[in-house]
Amino acid sequence: MTAKTENIVILTGSGVSAESGVATFRDKDGIWAKYDYRDVATPEGFAANPDLVHSFYNDRRRKLPSVEPNAAHIALAELEAGLAARGGGLTLVTQNVDDLHERAGSKNILHMHGELGKATCARCGAVCDCVEDLSVDHGCSVCRQNGGMRPYVVWFGEMPRFMDEAMDAILRADLFVSIGTSGSVYPAAGFAGEARAAGVRAMELNLEPSENAYVFEDSRYGPATKVVPDWVREILG
Ligand code: OAD
């Protein structure tokens, strides 16, 4: 990239955490090869079998302390600091519910699909930190009612969080970069097209071409721990 790249928006997906040992969704051994998303990632699935849904997210939450940020997460945190030091900025929009970007040092993060480390009360809307297992018996520490606690994650059929903030950042950016996502879930999959329509350059870094690879003007293919640090070095010089 030769043009100025000072304000960057990055969208990450599960591929950026794959080499940390966090499962992706649609790869051969991915999460959706083992579970039907309708059972564990929809409001209807939760209503039908809350124990199954709690156990699905409890298992994933329990694994978080044993995984570490990888070279791609760390490079993205360095990119944020490097751009800020020269007057630019980075907005990191992630579909991931893990906390590896935070633990690598990224600050300006929008978790559009929520966070495993939080729970929310369907009765009063309170959001709280959650490091323990959730169950149907769990009480809300704010409204004191039982039975309404659910993982603070966005399910299919629900509105992703921070959409206005993400779109505002994309429209102000001079580069949009999609990293480690298959481009199969909207609205995130539409960001690259929105960027291009607004005259913002778009590139992807992924193991292989994603479903909407044709939208991007530039691309780097390979494992995130290799292609992301290489690209960050190019940007920071
Ligand atoms: P997917 O499983 O759909 O896609 C993962 C992408 O990461 C694929 O394009 C892989 O090629 C790529 N990938 C795998 N390993 C990689 C590596 N080491 N380095 C770089 N890329 C790698 O996961 P997402 O795109 O994150 O939503 O899925 C998006 C959403 O669908 C998730 O947030 C989740 C899921 O259903 C909900 O649960 C609501």
Image (tube, rainbow, N blue to C red):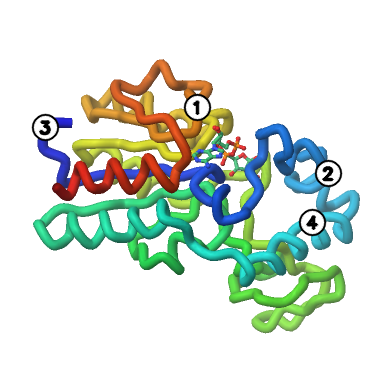
Left or right of residue 156: residue 45 = right
Q: Nearer the viewer, residue 128 or 107?
A: 107
Type of the residue with mark 3: Ala
For the residue with label 1, is its CB less than 8 Å from the closest atom of ligand 1? yes
Would you place residue 171 above or below residue 237 in this image? Answer: above
Which of labels 2 and 3 is toward the front?
A: 3
Comparing 39 with 216, the one in front is 216
Q: Dot 4 corresponds to which residue?
A: 56
Q: Quadrant of residue 101?
A: bottom left
Amino acid under disc 2 = Asp
Secondary structure beneath label 4: helix
**Which amino acid type corresponds to the residue marked 1 in the rendered image?**
Glu
Instruction: Tell me where residue 176 appears, x and y as whole percent.
Output: 30, 36
Residue at horizontal 23 percent and vertical 30 percent from the top: 200
Q: Earlier in the sequence, mark 3 or mark 4?
A: 3
User: Helix, strand, or loop for circle 1?
Assistant: loop
CA gap between label 2 and label 3 equals: 46 Å
Say whether residue 57 is left or right of residue 152: right
Q: Check residue 39 in the rendering and tell me which mark sits there, or answer none.
A: 2
* Horizontal arrangement in the rendering, residue 92 relative to residue 100 (left or right): left
